[in-house]
Image (spheres, rainbow, N blue to C red):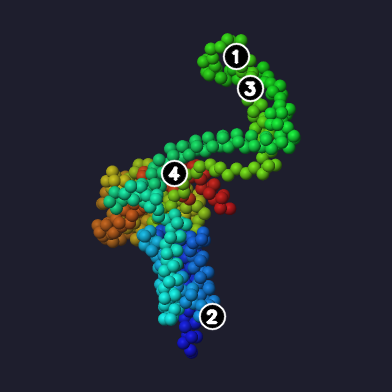
Amino acid sequence: MSDHRQRSLLLLIVGIAGLLVSLLAGAAEHISFLKSLCTSACRDTAEISLLYAPVWFWGALFWGAVAFTALFNSNLTPWIAAPAFGVEAALVWIMVRMGAPCMFCIVNAAIVVILLALAFRKKLFWQQLALALLFVMIGTAWIPYENKLFASTALKGEGGAESGVAARIGDEVITDQRLEVMVGSRLLDLKKEVYRLKTEKLDQLLIEYVLQKESKEKGQSPEQFLEENFPFAKFSPTEQEIDKSIQDNQERLREYQGPPEELRPRVRSFLEQQKRVQAINAYAHALGPKYGLKVYLQVPQPAKLKVDTNGAPSQGPADAAVTVIEFSDYECPACRGTHETVQKVKKTYGNQIRWVFMDYPLRRHKFAQKAAEAAHCAGDQGKFWEYQDLAFTREKLDTDSLVQYARELGLSTDTFRGCLDKDKHKEMVEKMVKAASEVGVDRTPSFLINGDLFIGGPAYEKFKAVIDADLKKKD
């Protein structure tokens, strides 16, 4: 086989390998096996786009082009390998700066290096180097800008504040998201009030606009149109309506200090004006479709939260329509009281939902940390959920009691005690606490249902209403 054909074959193999990696990266969020291989860092980098399309999509196109040129014109390979190396170098720099090492990104970078080595031509060295450097500069400038990854210098406060970070203390970070969750209900109320004020003003502007269009079509001024179609006499209230209004508003009318004989005419005038305005508004709203009215103002919704659940025990299929993440403490009275409801919810929905348990032992609870570690020690022997039921329902959580519960479940007590004594799962429990804190969870029990946070132990009916609504959305 000639050197040229051998090189073309190698390029074809590299192109197919790169294409496979790109497609796997794109499928990682939808295939449970791939999702288990991909850490939260992978998910962070998977959200990066280039020209507003996912990076894996461009990767698939590029590797397809590599395979095509290998088959039909391998002489073009040096001219596409150099820009690819530049873009990949930019992505690696972004990955390092984000502190988000991605398995698929690393493998793809390695394949790009192999491609560059195969496509290297000594006589084209300076041209390839220039192309690579050009695309490095373009990539490092454009990709962070498009994805809003890093705060620009102009947006940094004194001392160099980071985007999305409210404060740092040592290695600990307090994020804007965490603060928003902690003041979530109050912040949402404020946003709803702003929405209400905007809606009122928008409604007023739209009604005026529609009435202007309609009156113009009729060849009248807005005032003439309203006088002709909505005369005040048409909306005169009945005596019974006046009586009812006076009766319903006695508290407010106590402040009225005018002559008694003027009260009834004032109420009549108010009701007449109110009924007329309601009729005009209803008429204008009905005309909205005629003039192509579309309202885009959206009702404020609680932020959808994402938490790293890698390594956390779970029940139910990974691709379930509804995922419930429970943050709990075995010594917390409210958590213990909610456990019966949790069991009922799991039994009701079975494999329709995925249930993930995240430890959140509070520092003031003496035995909570060790109880959390004990449940994972039982999990090493395949009895996590059974052990959890005992830990939530038994009174004592001291070490001897924890070992006794393991014995009751038929576990190897020597292995179990060794696991506890060596603090085997201490780091994992602490990692769960940190992950929960980073998204703003600060009390137990708390639940994330498809990203929506519920503080405290919701009643069964509340769980059912939220889960049923999310299941309906997926149908």
Q: Amino acid at mark 4?
A: Phe
Q: Position of residue 338 (x, y in %)?
A: 41, 44
Give the spatial CA distance, label 2 vs label 1. 94 Å
Q: Secondary structure at mark 3?
A: helix
Q: Which mark is residue 121?
A: none
For the point 34% across and 61% down, the residue is 380
Is the residue marked by circle 4 packed among few (<14), some (14-19), or many (20+) residues within 10 Å? some
Is the residue marked by circle 2 packed among few (<14), some (14-19), or many (20+) residues within 10 Å? few
The residue lying furthest to the bottom in this view is: 1
Foreground disc of the pair 1, 4: 1
Q: Which mark is residue 454?
A: 4
Residue 26 in the figure: left or right of residue 166: right
Q: Which residue is mark 2?
A: 73
Q: Secondary structure at mark 2?
A: loop
Which callout, 2 or 1, points at the residue further toward the start of the chain?
Answer: 2
Is the residue marked by circle 1 packed among few (<14), some (14-19), or many (20+) residues within 10 Å? some
Residue 446 in the figure: left or right of residue 223: left
User: Nearest the camera: 24 or 52?
Assistant: 52
Give the spatial CA distance, label 2 vs label 3. 83 Å
Q: Which residue is mark 1?
A: 263
Foreground disc of the pair 2, 1: 2
Q: Position of residue 373 (x, y in %)?
A: 31, 54
Q: Which mark is residue 271?
A: 3
Residue 474 in the figure: left or right of residue 439: right
Which callout, 3 or 4, points at the residue further toward the start of the chain?
Answer: 3
Give the spatial CA distance, label 1 vs label 4. 50 Å
Which callout, 2 or 4, points at the residue further toward the start of the chain?
Answer: 2
